[in-house]
Image (cartoon, rainbow, N blue to C red):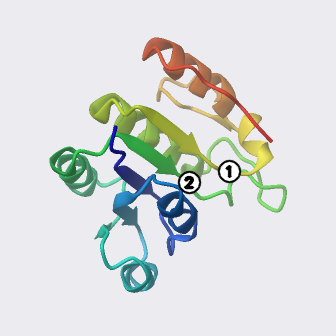
Amino acid sequence: MEFKGLSLFANVGIGETYLNGIGYPIVLANELLKDRCAFYAHQNPDHEIIQGDITNDVNFNNIISTAKNLGVNFILATPPCQGMSLLGKQEASDPRNLLITRVIRAMTLLNPEFVLIENVPQIYETKINAYGNGEIITIKEYLKQCADAMDYKIKFNF
């Protein structure tokens, strides 16, 4: 099987360097900040990159549509850790912590072979209102629930 990856929250593409080298090429990336996108494009000229906020539905739908057109079959996601890290406030209301829900939405729409989510160890205990219904659960619980619902096996490692 030929692998083709989507990198969400790509920053400047450090993780892509390793994955490309072992046969898991990223073909599409998304990053919020324009200067990071420019550096990413310079470092990875054969990758397509979409600059913009993943929480904006137009941007998100563009990412998903492009990923489908490119035949993406795995996802690398490195959502920002500032709201989860020991240096952050670790508040359930931090909107950055909800970015994990966009990763799950992308999984639902793309049905990839596998997903690699990288973050700080505190991701396990960070609490969010994942479903928007007022119920606060940990990101670890949320990921377990979603993996079960989508019939994915999940492994937590640190």
Q: What element carries label 1?
A: loop
Out of 128 and 113, give the one closest to the viewer.
113
Amino acid on which disc 1 is placed: Asn
**Relative to 113, is 30 above or below?**
below
**Relative to 2, is 147 above or below?**
above
Out of 17 and 105, give the one closest to the viewer.
17
Q: What element carries label 2?
A: loop
- Identify the residue at image location x=39%, y=76%: 44
Amino acid on which disc 2 is placed: Pro
The residue sitting at the right extreme is 86
**Relative to 87, is 55 above or below?**
above
- Identify the residue at image location x=37%, y=34%: 112
**Relative to 79, is 51 above or below?**
below
Mark 1 and mark 2 lie on one chain; the one further toward the N terminus is 2
Q: Mark 1 points at which residue?
A: 119
Q: Mark 2 points at which residue?
A: 79
Is disc 1 in contact with disc 2, using a CB cutoff of under 8 Å?
yes
Residue 150, position as x, y percentages in the image: 42, 17
- Identify the residue at image location x=49%, y=20%: 152
Where is residue 136, by image quadrant? top right
Tell me the quadrant of the picture where the C terminus can be found. Answer: top right
- Identify the residue at image location x=56%, y=54%: 78
Tell me the quadrant of the picture where the N terminus can be found. Answer: top left
Where is residue 79, by image quadrant? bottom right
